[in-house]
Structures are given as C-alpha cells and as structure tokens.
Image (cartoon, helix red, strand yellow):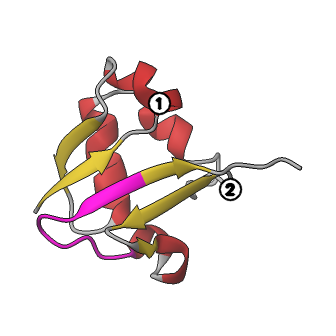
C-alpha cells in the first residue's frame, strides 16, 4: 500500500531535503521501516531505544493521532498521508 509521509523540517536532513516521501506500508511500523530503508538513519530519529515512537513526536494517519489508534500497529490505508509533527513546548 502506497502512502505519503510528510517530513518535518528538522528531519529533512535525513531525507536529502525532501518534504515528503512515498513508501509502502500497511501500518505505522511498516511505514517507519520503509522510510528508514529509503532514508537510512531516519528510523533512529523516530523510534526510541525500545522501538517505540519518540515522545516528542506526534504522528497522524490522515487526521487521526496514532496514539489513540494503536500506535505503531495503527493501520495505514492505501493512499493515506502520514504526518510526522514535532511536539512544541514552551511557556
């Protein structure tokens, strides 16, 4: 299943400056693995040492936050857009 991944500016150094990537995957874990195969090293910036999505990243499949849809097991339908959004903190 082909999906489009939106890459945030801080991670574009890992994608050669590309703002999007088209990869195959049926769930978030497969999409992250495919993205890492296409752009080696980006997986380490998305996943922590335990293999979970890093806390400071928000990941959406279309408009749904994957934290509430199964995390890495969240399904990604064909043609979906996966958005990686760094969390913003401040005060």
The kind of secondary structure element at disc 2 is loop
Answer yes or no: is residue 41 visible.
no
Instruction: Identify the residue position indicated by label 1 in the image.
Output: 9
- In the image, what residue occupies the spot 35% across and 68% down? 61
- In the image, what residue occupies the spot 37% across and 60% down? 29
- In the image, what residue occupies the spot 12% across and 68% down? 78
Give whichever of 34, 14 is nearer the camera: 14
- In the image, what residue occupies the spot 18% across and 73% down? 77
Give whichever of 29, 8 is nearer the camera: 8
Tell me where residue 23 appears, x and y as whole percent.
18, 47
Q: What segment carries the magenta color?
A: 74-83
Instruction: Identify the residue position indicated by label 2 in the image.
Output: 55
The kind of secondary structure element at disc 1 is helix
Tell me where residue 76 appears, x and y as whole percent.
26, 70
Tell me where residue 43 appears, x and y as whole percent.
45, 39
Labelled pair 1, 2 in contact (Cβ < 8 Å): no
Tell me where residue 26 appears, x and y as whole percent.
21, 68
Which disc is residue 22 wearing? none
Q: Is residue 5 above or below residue 25?
A: above
Q: Earlier in the sequence, mark 1 or mark 2?
A: 1
Which label lies toward us, 1 or 2? 1
Tell me the chief SS of the magenta region. loop
Instruction: Please indicate whether residue 49 sits to the left or right of residue 30 in the image.
Output: right
Within-10-Å neighbours for mark 2: few <14, some 14–19, many 20+ = few
- The quarter of the rendered structure image containing the N terminus is bottom left
Q: Is residue 73 above or below residue 14?
A: below
Instruction: Please indicate whether residue 48 sits to the left or right of residue 66 in the image.
Output: right
């Amino acid at each position: 299943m082909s999906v489009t991944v939106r890459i945030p500016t801080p991670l574009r150094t890992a994608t050669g400056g590309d703002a999007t990537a088209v990869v195959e995957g049926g769930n978030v874990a497969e999409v992250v693995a495919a993205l890492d195969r296409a752009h080696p090293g980006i997986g380490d910036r998305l996943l922590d040492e335990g293999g979970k999505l890093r806390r400071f990243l928000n990941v959406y499949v279309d408009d749904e936050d994957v934290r509430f849809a199964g995390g890495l097991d969240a399904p990604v339908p064909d043609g979906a857009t996966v958005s990686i959004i760094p969390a913003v903190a401040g005060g």
